[in-house]
Image (cartoon, helix red, strand yellow):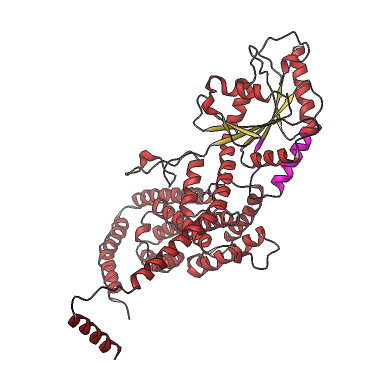
Amino acid sequence: MIPIARWRLIVLAILGAVPLLVLLVLGVVWLWQLPWEARLSVYLGLLAFWSATAILSWHWQIGGNLLPRPKPPDQFAYSDRDKEAWKLVLSRIEKAAQEDPQKFVAIQTYLDTGREMAQELAQFYHPAAKDPVGKLTVLEVLAVIQLASEDLWELLDEKLPGSHLLTIDQWRALPKAAEWYRTVMPLYWAGSAILDPIGALIRYTASRVGIGSFVDRLQKNVVLWFYTNFLLRMGHYLIEVNSGRLKIGARRYRELVAAARGQSGTDGQPAESRAEPEPRTKPIPIQITVLGRVKAGKSSLINALLGEQRAATDVLPLTKEITRYHLKPKGIEDSLTILDTVGYGNEGPRQDQLQETLEAARNSDILLIVLNARDPGRQADVMLLDAIENYFRTRPELRRPHLFAVMTHIDLLPPSLEWQPPYDFQKPTRTKEKNIAEACEVVKQSLGNRAAVVPVCTQSGKLYGVEEFLLPLIVSVLDESRAIALLRTIKNESDARALNRLWDQLLHAGGKILDVLLSNRPTISPPSSPGQLYASHSTSDKREA
């Protein structure tokens, strides 16, 4: 039996199609009555339009321009391990292009694919675990579903016209659109052939090349486009959850990503584009840690970076080994923080000093190791860099900060009495330039090519290289530094959130229990008279009976 709503739609469709069929028949009769030359002109014109349709549909669909290209999620915060995991998602996308599009309209396909991807990616991050998915919390799994669903909802709402009217039945029937077209059209061609055989043959050939192939491709591309976006979003958030970045919750995750990207609000949209502006998320500060041996020139470098902005209120001792400064260079919106570590000796940092330095490196996005251009000893510096490298190797959820070697005291390189900047150490011609370039290469080789070398002079009255070379280099990596800062902030917040949230939940539960106990405690009030006391006893006796 056909449902009532459906038969009404069928009646409306038939009523609407009758005028079109009448016009079609009248058009064929009219063409049949025209002279052969006029009919040929009409056929050639129609053939030109159908040919243009065929060429454009083929070009746009093959090139992926008819539908918006599936855009990978923002991966700027991915670690090296995350990038390897992303290859598993791309492999699924490549295989999907060879699948039958009918498969992509079944809800069960998405459930099975989501479960398989969750198992595959969890196994990648925890290869030794028997049940890697079991290590995730329920809230983390719900965060994946929430984030992926929100992204797909916005994608359909913005990119697919009429998506708000698309029903499940219509979605399931989408791959059959070409089949319906191929079923109905032979009836039309049979009727046309009776009235105008030659014209019908021309139109049939053009439509098979143009409209027919267009419909065939379109029905496949639409469902494949949505399924590909599903793989991209689900894969991305499964990587995020296995990397531990969704422990802070879906909403806070979006806030921090927006802050790291320099966006306002929680949805990544500029504040002026929303009807009701939301409070701006506080930007994540970029932290720069300055390392180096005693008398390498760390203090002079920090003074050169701070310039006139240095003040007593800017100096915030964090520990006995580390001091914090705030830096706001001109033309840079990011908030920069400089962590100044205590210099170490020729034997390298002490054990307690090394722990402080490693913790500072963990909370940093850019590392500046300061080296004296005239001091050939580099063993202590190499030992420190090895320790930092091993520290991050055992923490794959974090990304290593950018490392720059700042070579100071270049004014003392021979000829020591010459000081006539600017110097071009990339293409040196003068003796001073050649010696600076040679010293840079020596430092680079001694550090194992682990850092770009920046030559500077921080002596008062000879300041050179900080604004010319160092600051532009820092600015060039700010985007990646924001990603490192995002991972650092998420890690710190998730660690603190675990204990704080449990404590808050215990307090909340304790308060509820206390409220229940207090609400059920009997209250005793003195009776106003012996009769009232008797009445209360008789009432309680009746209740017990």
Image coords of residue 198 (percent x, y): 41, 59
For the view shown, which residue lies furthest in the top direction? 417
The magenta segment is: 381-402
Query: Is-magenta flag for residue 428?
Result: no
Quadrant into which the C terminus falls: bottom left
Please determine whether, in this image, residue 93 is positioned above or below residue 455.
Answer: below
Q: Is residue 109 left or right of residue 91?
A: left
User: Foreground: 179 or 207?
Assistant: 179
User: Foreground: 91 or 117?
Assistant: 117
Quadrant into which the N terminus falls: bottom left
Please determine whether, in this image, residue 244 is positioned above or below residue 322.
Answer: below
Image coords of residue 532 (percent x, y): 19, 80
Image coords of residue 41 (percent x, y): 37, 48
For the view shown, which residue lies furthest in the bottom direction? 545
Query: Is-magenta flag for residue 392?
Result: yes
Q: Is residue 177 left or right of residue 328?
A: left
User: Foreground: 161 or 74?
Assistant: 74
Residue 293: image quadrant is top right
Residue at (50%, 58%) from the top-left corner? 503
Image coords of residue 10 (percent x, y): 29, 70
